[in-house]
Image: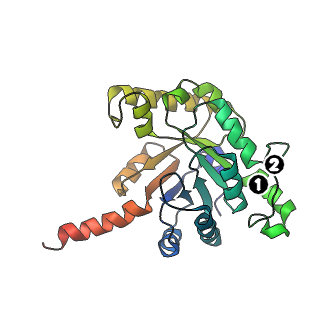
Amino acid sequence: MKDIKRALKNGELTIGSWVTMPNAITLEMMCNSKFDWLAIDLEHSSISIESAQDLIRIIRLHDIFPFVRLTSNDPDQIKRVMDAGALGIIVPMVKSAEDVTKAIDSIYYANKGKRSVGLARAQDYGRNLSGYIKDLEKNAVLIVQIEHIDAVNSLEEIFSIENLDGYFIGPIDLSASMGMPGEIESKEVKKVIANIIEVSKKMGVPGGQHIIEPDMDLLKQSKGQGAKFIGYSLDIRLFDKALSEFMNGRDE
């Protein structure tokens, strides 16, 4: 399994993708496609906690790093997906340093955090709690989404929190919080995004880039610009692109 925590710290290239369908077959196909990490999306999908555990199992059996994007910064949900075997957590709509601390408290046991200890899949159902604690300290990854103007106004405080491993920018939600929903190409939104990147570089916090549409030229462009933590599309867009190509070309 790729050491994502170390890769983020050292600026090494990793490429992953987003999982929104609770389907073992499509996930196995993604696992066989040389992704370094896969993120199960609970925020914008119908995936349940029970399904998420099954998807995490498949990802880990293929020796790929499993992220889960939460519905919100919910300590109970973080605890459950971590107990299910997630190694990385992506927290949407982080607005303050307090939000980051709350997530850290939910990921780690004392003394680093405040998570309660349970015996589930992650702990090998009680057979390997001590091993899990060591693995958690070494490999757990926290990624926050900067997607609200309140977060932009608190960037230095957010990026100064120890045990924060990286971030993603959410441009559409960010534009909405600025009163310009969907206007991600506007001068104002681009200026704010440039400021986020500048501050993160100054403070040594690695940023991720999510390429929504499955386009290899965009991937090459992103790599050429120096991006190191790249989310390449998501299952439904990858599938839809293939169907669209068929639909548009069937009568030629």
Q: Residue furthest top?
A: 153
As displayed, is residue 204 above or below residue 79?
above
* Residue 171 coordinates in the image, percent (x, y): 42, 38
Bin the neighbour count of mark 2 within 10 Å (Cα to Cα): few under 14, some 14-19, many 20 and up.
Answer: some
* Residue 93 coordinates in the image, percent (x, y): 54, 39
**Quarter of the figure with residue 91:** top right
Per the image, label 2 sits on a secondary structure element best described as loop
Q: Which residue is mark 1?
A: 136
Measuring 84% from the left and 45% from the top, which residue is drawn there?
A: 110
**Quarter of the figure with residue 139:** bottom right
Measuring 71% from the left and 40% from the top, which residue is drawn there?
A: 163
Q: Nearer the viewer, residue 92 or 212?
A: 92
**Residue type at numbered disc 1:** Leu
Q: Is residue 126 left or right of residue 151?
A: right
Residue 119 in view (yes/no): yes
- Disc nearest the viewer among 2 and 1: 2
Q: Which mark is residue 109?
A: 2
Q: Nearer the viewer, residue 222 or 145?
A: 145
* Residue 233 coordinates in the image, percent (x, y): 42, 56
Tag 2–tag 1 contact (CB < 8 Å) = yes
Distance from Cα at disc 2 to Cα at disc 1 = 9 Å
Q: Is residue 131 left or right of residue 54?
A: right
Residue 10 in view (yes/no): no
Per the image, label 1 sits on a secondary structure element best described as helix
Bin the neighbour count of mark 1 within 10 Å (Cα to Cα): few under 14, some 14-19, many 20 and up.
Answer: some
Q: Is residue 132 left or right of residue 183?
A: right
Q: Is residue 16 left or right of residue 171?
A: right
